[in-house]
Image: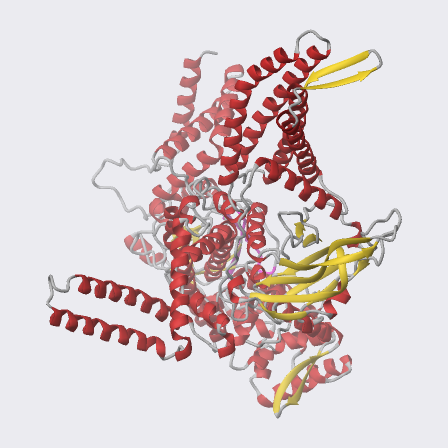
């Protein structure tokens, strides 16, 4: 089949569909048409008032309580029941299916959920008004009997004024069906377009493929059904494409109605409306807008949960930006709280207790004094020029008077003996902030950080998000305030003896109140509501929805009887006593709740518990909760007297376990208190030593790595590569020294070896050139391996200068091997007597000319990269989320990446710092001689940010005690010994000196010097805990160190080696772990000097 006939058939199908629309018998163009409502019946389509995206527009659209968080419109009824009374009755019941259509049922038919219904509306005689109500569950028999009374109907049901509709084609709550595009929430043109555009955005590609397949099917088999299906699909796709084209370009379309607890469905709503139009036929049709207050409450709660969930997701996605941004801003901005903390810690012996406000005053005074100092300088410079001497003296006196006024503000809270020194501390503090920004302090914040992007996000984007969330919650709570008392319209009929009704109440409570107390405003709002006399059953949630229990707790004598019943030791006695006070239905319902202590009611209690804090009669309000835990958890409520005050206590096995858990949790939370340390302490970064000369550095490095390798229990690939590189470089340097000594010192240009009749002669220059080049080549190759390990472990956060350093080393590998090959080849030719020594030397020098130039260039590049290589903090700033490279990407950061980045910062700031003291030790040798070596005699551990009662540290320590004499084959290393308890017993705790930061310092000596010390520290930083990250610095295992007293020339006082995670520590793993903290060994973390 060709395309043209197919399109023709598709158009015919569309025309056929249009021809099925209903038209009246009148000539529509006639000016004398009859009344549209001329038929004896009017077709009534039940619907509900609901929150919407756009406000409905009609004079008879009149919701009882308009919402502030959303406009209101009409929507299909939710699954439930419609009750109808017309003329003289009888009362009829219609079940509402999930598609919004109705099915007539007997009044007593049991509840069953329906997926599809039969009719969209009901035809009613227009001569008499009707009454309707909507309910989520069936009404009981007694309630149906009550509705037969006119007064009860007027109180509970909505009047459908059919007589008014017959007169003016509309009535209050009964707008015309033909106005559906301006009344029905999903079908309003702009909202409909947006929904279609979103569907196209989500499923456009799939829809196009589907239309293509249907076209192929229709071409292959052009039946009427196939052509109609293709016509409908292609028309639907075209409509979606047109809707997508009307949306702002470049912006993602937001799905409408996601805030609603009821799915926002365009197509099913259109089908419902089309069916209503089809069923009405010649009858005039109107909507019957019914109240669905529980539906509105469900929507409010659903949106509030959604807003809070999205906010939590935003916080999770941006917590890293906020944390790191605050840290960086703290480095470059002045803060009164930080100044107050700095002075309080520095002058703790004076018991200073400066507040952040006083810290701000100190900063402001410095700014004013600087301005006045400049003014004083200017006046002195203009003395005798712009000002006469008398005039200048007068101006200077005025400036000094102003200076005194500024200083007097500070003198009121700074002791006189500390005034000058404190002013200097503040000046240094302010200068440090400027230096950090400009790069003079070694942090180079301005160079590494995109401050403009960071400030814009911190000052505008983040606050704007919090304002939007707060504004949304305020509007939703305003709607809750209006709709909480209206829940009676949907719960007034509940039968306390019906388990079906009570189970429904459980699910309703969860759906309407789960987000009520997500903010303190909501908790207070609900406390006020439950204390009111509103008849709605949601108010009685704490009393298990029982009016009988509420009446009991509002009566003092009956409340006391209930308390007595709860305190009885025997469970059966408690039940019997409660049954005398409460009716059987109430007690049966409470026992039903006790059978499922992890059910919906319990979950709701945990969410609404915050409102009890604001309740004036907490015991009475929570009586339902106490009854449930007494009958279901065997926990008694008893009253006692402590310190002359009546107190309530829960008694029972589970209550005691809960109390212990609460105490433990409170103690754990207390570890997160900073105890006066408001801001992160100043951590001093140690600078690297500059290379003195290539020979010295290589030899010293060889000694260092050799010492590390000897001190460690094992090493990883990177440390092995470092060691090999150092050894080989040292060998090359030694070879160069021997070469120079032989050529220049001894004048030996050749090295000869004779054995019998054989003799071999090699030029000294080429021979040692080959040795030096080969050793240097292998050394450079091992260094390249070490650098590669560092780059791979750093992943994407690589210091660019480290990469440049690797490039230089790569070049050095090639050049050194070329030198070795050149020397080896010329030496071989001389050994074979192919060339003479002078020719070999000349050729070697000729070949080394360009190689030396390359070595000089590569060496310069290497040194430049070495000098420029960032400090750990600089490297962190250069790769953090606010660096120039990452700040403008606005990409979501994976949770694990956020955790890793914050942990890296925590390690930089709060990793324990170690120091040791060594002394010379003499050991008897095995041959009667004396061996002299260094030994570790004292260890100091600094815990940055720690305070008594707010820090915890796990310590394991193993060391080798210096032996009395050297053993044969064992040397002077000594035997590994567990030294944790020994060292702790000798420790003294003090505050870290002010010039080294803030926190606690542990210092202790060893009974005899050590030849090696290994320790592992798991430091639970209180500040890291507050940051919401893994609180143990260095991860779950903490940080391991090995200390050696022999640090070589570069570290004469010994060397402290921080181990990497992959390096083995078998001896240390066997050492006992000692926990120091608030609960165990707290005395070790209590400084002698109190703050």
Of the pair 639 and 346, the residue shown nearer to us: 346
Of the pair 838 and 456, the residue shown nearer to us: 838
Rendered location of residue 589, percent (x, y): 66, 71
Rendered location of residue 299, percent (x, y): 47, 56
Q: Residue at x 70, y 73 (%)?
A: 660
**Which quarter shows the C terminus?**
bottom right
Q: Where are the magenta residues, as a range? A: 91-108
Rendered location of residue 760, percent (x, y): 76, 14
**Which residue of the protein is positioned furthest toward the top in this rendering?**
834
Q: Which image quarter: residue 1019?
A: bottom right
Of the pair 125 and 224, the residue shown nearer to us: 224
Residue 324 visible somewhere in the drawing: yes
In this view, 620 is above or below 1:
below
Q: Magenta includes 1084?
A: no
Q: Magenta includes 104?
A: yes
**Which residue of the protein is positioned furthest toward the bottom in this rendering?**
644
Q: Taking 582 as reference, is 28 left or right? A: left
The count of marks equals: 0
Q: Residue at x 72, y 12 (%)?
A: 831
Residue 285 visible somewhere in the drawing: no
What colouring style does the render use?
A: secondary structure
In this view, 212 is above or below 37:
above
Q: Taking 786 as reference, is 462 left or right? A: left
Of the pair 905 and 607, the residue shown nearer to us: 905
Q: Taking 894 as reference, is 355 left or right? A: left
Q: Taking 402 as reference, is 821 left or right? A: right
Rendered location of residue 215, percent (x, y): 49, 20
**Which residue of the protein is positioned furthest toward the front in this rendering?**
746
């Amino acid at each position: 089949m060709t395309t043209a006939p197919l399109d023709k058939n598709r158009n015919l199908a569309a025309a056929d569909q249009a021809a099925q629309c209903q038209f009246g018998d009148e000539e529509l163009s006639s000016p004398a048409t009859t009344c549209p409502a001329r038929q004896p019946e009017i077709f009534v389509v039940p619907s509900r008032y609901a929150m919407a995206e756009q406000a409905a527009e009609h004079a008879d659209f009149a919701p009882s309580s308009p919402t502030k968080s959303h406009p209101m419109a009409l929507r299909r009824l939710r699954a439930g029941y419609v009750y109808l009374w017309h003329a003289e009755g009888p009362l009829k019941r219609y079940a509402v299916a999930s598609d919004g259509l109705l099915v007539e049922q007997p009044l007593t038919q049991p509840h069953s959920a329906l997926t599809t219904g039969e009719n969209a509306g009901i035809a009613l005689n227009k001569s008499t008004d009707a009454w309707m109500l909507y309910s989520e569950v069936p009404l009981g028999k007694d309630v149906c009997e009550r509705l037969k009374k006119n007064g009860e109907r007027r109180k509970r049901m909505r009047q459908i004024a059919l007589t008014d509709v017959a007169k003016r084609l509309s009535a209050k709550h009964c707008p015309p069906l033909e106005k559906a595009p301006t009344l029905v929430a999903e079908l309003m043109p702009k909202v409909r377009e947006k929904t279609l555009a979103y569907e196209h955005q989500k499923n456009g590609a799939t829809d196009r493929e589907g239309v293509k397949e249907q076209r192929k099917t229709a071409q292959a088999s052009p039946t009427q059904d196939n052509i109609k299906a293709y016509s409908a699909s292609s028309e639907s796709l075209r409509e979606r494409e047109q809707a997508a084209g009307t949306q702002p370009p470049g912006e993602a379309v937001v799905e409408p109605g996601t805030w609603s607890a009821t799915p926002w469905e365009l197509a099913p709503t259109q089908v419902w409306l089309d069916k209503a139009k089809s069923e009405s036929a010649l009858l005039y049709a109107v909507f019957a807008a019914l109240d669905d207050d529980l539906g509105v409450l469900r929507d409010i709660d659903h949106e509030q949960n959604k807003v809070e969930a999205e906010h939590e997701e935003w916080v999770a996605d941006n917590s890293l930006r906020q944390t790191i941004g605050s840290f960086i801003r703290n480095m470059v901005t002045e803060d009164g709280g930080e100044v107050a903390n700095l002075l309080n810690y520095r002058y703790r012996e004076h018991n200073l207790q400066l507040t952040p406000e006083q810290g701000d005053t100190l900063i402001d005074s410095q700014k004013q004094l600087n301005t006045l100092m400049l003014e004083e300088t200017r006046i002195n410079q203009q003395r005798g020029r712009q000002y006469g001497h008398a005039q200048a003296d007068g101006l200077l006196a005025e400036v000094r008077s102003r200076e005194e006024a500024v200083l007097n503000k500070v003198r009121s809270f700074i002791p006189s003996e500390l005034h000058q020194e404190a002013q200097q501390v503040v000046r240094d503090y302010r200068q440090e902030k400027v230096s950090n920004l400009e790069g003079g302090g070694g942090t180079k914040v301005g160079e590494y950080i995109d401050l403009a992007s960071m400030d814009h996000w911190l000052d505008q984007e983040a606050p704007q998000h919090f304002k939007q969330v707060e504004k949304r919650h305020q509007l939703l709570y305003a709607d809750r305030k209006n709709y909480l008392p209206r829940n009676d319209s949907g719960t007034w009929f509940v039968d306390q003896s019906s388990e079906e009704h009570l189970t429904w109440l459980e699910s309703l409570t969860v759906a309407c109140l789960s987000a009520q107390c997500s903010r303190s405003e909501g908790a207070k709002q609900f406390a006020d509501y439950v204390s009111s006399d509103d008849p709605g059953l949601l108010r009685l949630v704490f009393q298990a929805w029982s009016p009988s229990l509420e009446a009991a707790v509002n009566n003092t004598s009956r409340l006391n009887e209930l308390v007595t019943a709860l305190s009885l030791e025997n469970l059966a006695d408690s039940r019997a006593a409660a049954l005398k006070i409460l009716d059987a239905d109430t007690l049966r319902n409470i026992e039903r709740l006790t059978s499922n202590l992890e059910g919906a009611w319990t979950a709701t209690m945990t969410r609404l518990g915050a409102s009890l804090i604001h309740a004036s009669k907490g015991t009475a309000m929570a009586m339902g909760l106490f009854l449930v835990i007494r009958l279901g958890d065997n926990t008694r409520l008893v009253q006692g007297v402590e310190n002359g005050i009546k107190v309530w206590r829960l008694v029972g096995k589970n209550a005691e376990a809960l109390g212990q858990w609460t105490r433990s949790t409170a103690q754990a939370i207390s570890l997160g208190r900073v105890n006066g340390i408001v801001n992160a302490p100043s951590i001093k970064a140690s600078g690297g030593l500059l290379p003195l000369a290539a020979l010295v550095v290589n030899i010293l490095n060889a000694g260092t790595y050799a010492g590390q390798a000897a001190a460690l229990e094992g090493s990883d690939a990177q440390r092995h590569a470092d060691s090999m590189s150092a050894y080989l470089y040292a060998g090359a340097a030694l070879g160069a020294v021997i070469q120079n000594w032989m050529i220049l010192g001894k004048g030996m240009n050749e090295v000869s070896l004779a054995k019998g009749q054989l003799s071999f002669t090699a030029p000294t220059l080429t021979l040692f050139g080959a040795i030096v080049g080969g050793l240097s080549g292998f050394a450079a190759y091992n260094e390249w391996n070490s650098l590669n390990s560092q780059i791979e472990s750093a992943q994407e956060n690589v210091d660019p200068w480290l990469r440049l350093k690797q490039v230089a080393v790569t070049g050095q590998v090639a050049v050194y091997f070329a030198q070795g090959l050149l020397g080896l080849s010329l030496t071989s030719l001389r050994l074979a007597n192919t060339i003479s020594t002078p020719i070999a030397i000349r050729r070697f020098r000729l070949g080394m000319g360009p190689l030396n130039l390359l070595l000089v260039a590569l060496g310069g590049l290497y040194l430049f990269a070495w000098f420029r290589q960032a400090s750990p903090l600089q490297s962190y700033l250069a790769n953090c989320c606010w660096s120039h490279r990452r700040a403008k990407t606005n990409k979501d950061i994976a949770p694990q990446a956020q955790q890793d980045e914050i942990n890296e910062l925590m390690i930089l700031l709060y990793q324990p710092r170690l120091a040791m003291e060594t002394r010379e030790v003499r050991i008897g040798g095995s041959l009667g001689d004396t061996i002299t070596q260094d030994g570790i005699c004292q260890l100091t551990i600094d815990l940055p940010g720690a305070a008594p009662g707010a820090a915890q540290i796990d310590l394991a320590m193993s060391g080798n005690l210096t032996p009395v004499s050297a053993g044969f084959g064992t040397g002077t290393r000594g035997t590994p010994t567990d030294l944790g308890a020994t060292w702790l017993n000798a420790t003294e705790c003090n505050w870290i000196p002010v010039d080294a930061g803030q926190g606690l310092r542990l210092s202790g000596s060893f009974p005899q010097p050590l030849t090696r010390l290994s320790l592992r520290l798991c430091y639970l930083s209180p500040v890291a805990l507050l940051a919401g990250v893994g609180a143990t610095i260095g991860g779950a295992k903490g940080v391991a160190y090995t200390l050696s007293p022999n640090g070589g020339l570069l570290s004469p006082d010994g060397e402290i080696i921080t181990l990497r995670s992959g390096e083995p520590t078998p001896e240390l793993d066997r050492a006992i772990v000692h926990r120091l903290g608030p609960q165990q060994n707290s005395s070790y973390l209590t400084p002698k000097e109190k703050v």
